[in-house]
Image (cartoon, rainbow, N blue to C red):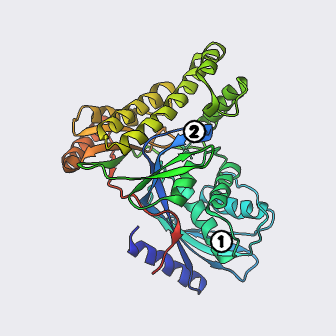
């Protein structure tokens, strides 16, 4: 996050509300591996990144709140009483959602003003919505001394997503954005909330994101549909989630589910094992194996879980034909957004040039390359 942008957002707050704000920095996230496993009580391996959302916030003396979306130059006034989700509300639903869910949780807040903005490309699958939600809940927790733990805060952020943005998401995005650590990826058991840290140093390799610039839309029913397929499958064998499903259950499900639904169940089960293998590979400094697991994950997402798209597949196939990349896959919910690539550091400039050219030849549009740094989770920004 650039200091310049932080300053601009703080200045916008000061000129609009005549007060000095509290400033919160809340990052977006990447995910090394473990896609669509979080809402199945499985494992994920995400990290917070150096792209995020800045929220400048302060109590208000009015009986309404004012929220300014700095990047869009849009302003929204709302009252804290009887908040309901807005139809096609976009960013506004994240804001009112957090305010409503804090109150539903039994905590008292009064009116506040805020300006937020950042440098997470919209729709890139880097969890700008989780960063907005976490930034706000963190800021309100400070301002109103709510005494919420980080875990309570991310559960509130997730509720805002479920009940206001109407995306039945898991907990990975909010978790990674809140708990991220510098140079570190976190393996999270989404059932128990146990997590451990992995210092990331891939030696001669590094991570590189390539954005298809195809905007994914998670609220599209595809995401919620997949979640409900998984839940129904688990409950049909009397299990709480796919996490608990055994090989024996899989054999039963193979005969009771449609082929498409069984493939989704199979993908989740395989992806959970891949996260475990990936964590071992990182511990053993076996980066080649980690790379192979990324490719396998993509295969599953493309052919079994069916959440990829032509642009993502093209980028992954292109990587496979270039030996400087040792693993790649689509990242996040799918249907657009970024691929995550494990690439030789010194090949980044030449590979980037080649992939940009090839992508634009194929789709007549640009892809974007992001070099990311693993960063600290949601925190107060000190000037
Ligand atoms: C989105 C959701 C997450 C997770 C991923 C897929 O980012 O918000 O909870 O399900 O998709 O892994």
The quarter of the picture where residue 323 lies is top left
**Which sits earlier in the primary sequence, circle 2 or circle 1?**
2
Q: Position of residue 280 (x, y in %)?
A: 40, 40
Q: Position of residue 183 (x, y in %)?
A: 38, 58
Residue ranking furthest to the top? 255
Residue 148 left/right relative to 123: right
Picture mark count: 2
Residue closest to the eye, 38 or 280: 280
Q: Position of residue 110 (x, y in %)?
A: 74, 75
Residue ranking furthest to the bottom? 18
Q: Mark 2 points at which residue?
A: 42
- SS class, disc 1: helix
Q: Quadrant of ligand 1?
A: top right
Q: Position of residue 106 (x, y in %)?
A: 79, 64
Residue closest to the eye, 189 or 292: 189
Q: Mark 1 points at which residue?
A: 140
């Amino acid at each position: 996050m650039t200091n310049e942008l932080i300053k601009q957002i703080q200045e916008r707050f000061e000129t609009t509300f005549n007060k000095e704000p509290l400033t919160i920095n809340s990052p977006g996230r990447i995910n090394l591996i473990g896609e669509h496993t979080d809402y199945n009580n499985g494992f994920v391996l995400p990290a917070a990144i150096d792209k995020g959302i800045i929220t400048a916030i302060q109590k208000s003396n009015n009986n309404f709140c004012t929220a300014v979306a700095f990047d869009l130059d849009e302003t929204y006034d709302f009252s804290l009483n009887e908040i309901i989700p807005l139809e096609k509300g976009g960013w506004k639903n994240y804001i009112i959602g957090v305010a409503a869910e804090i109150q539903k949780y039994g905590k008292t807040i009064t009116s506040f003003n805020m300006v937020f903005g950042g440098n997470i490309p919209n729709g890139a699958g880097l969890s700008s919505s989780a960063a907005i939600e976490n930034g706000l809940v963190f800021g309100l927790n400070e301002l109103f001394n709510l005494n919420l733990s980080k875990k309570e805060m991310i559960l509130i952020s997730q509720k805002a997503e479920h009940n206001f943005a109407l995306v039945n998401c898991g907990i990975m995005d909010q978790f990674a954005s809140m708990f991220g650590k510098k140079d570190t990826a976190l393996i999270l058991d989404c059932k128990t909330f146990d997590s451990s840290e992995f210092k990331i140093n891939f030696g001669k390799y590094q991570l590189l994101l390539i954005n298809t610039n195809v905007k994914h839309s998670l609220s599209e029913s595809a995401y919620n549909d997949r979640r409900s397929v998984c839940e129904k499958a688990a409950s049909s064998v009397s299990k709480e989630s796919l996490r608990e499903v055994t090989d024996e259950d899989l054999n039963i499900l193979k005969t009771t589910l449609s082929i498409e639904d069984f493939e989704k169940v199979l993908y989740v089960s395989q992806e959970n094992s891949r996260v475990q293998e990936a964590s071992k590979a990182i511990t053993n400094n076996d980066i080649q194996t980690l790379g192979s697991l990324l490719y396998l994950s993509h295969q599953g997402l493309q052919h079994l879980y069916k959440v990829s798209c032509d642009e993502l597949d093209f980028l992954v196939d292109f990587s496979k034909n270039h030996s400087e990349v040792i693993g790649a896959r689509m990242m996040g919910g799918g249907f657009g957004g970024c691929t995550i690539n494990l690439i030789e550091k010194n090949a980044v400039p030449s590979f980037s040039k080649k992939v940009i050219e090839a992508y634009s030849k194929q789709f007549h549009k640009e892809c974007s390359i992001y070099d990311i740094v693993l960063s600290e989770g949601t925190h107060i920004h000190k000037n």
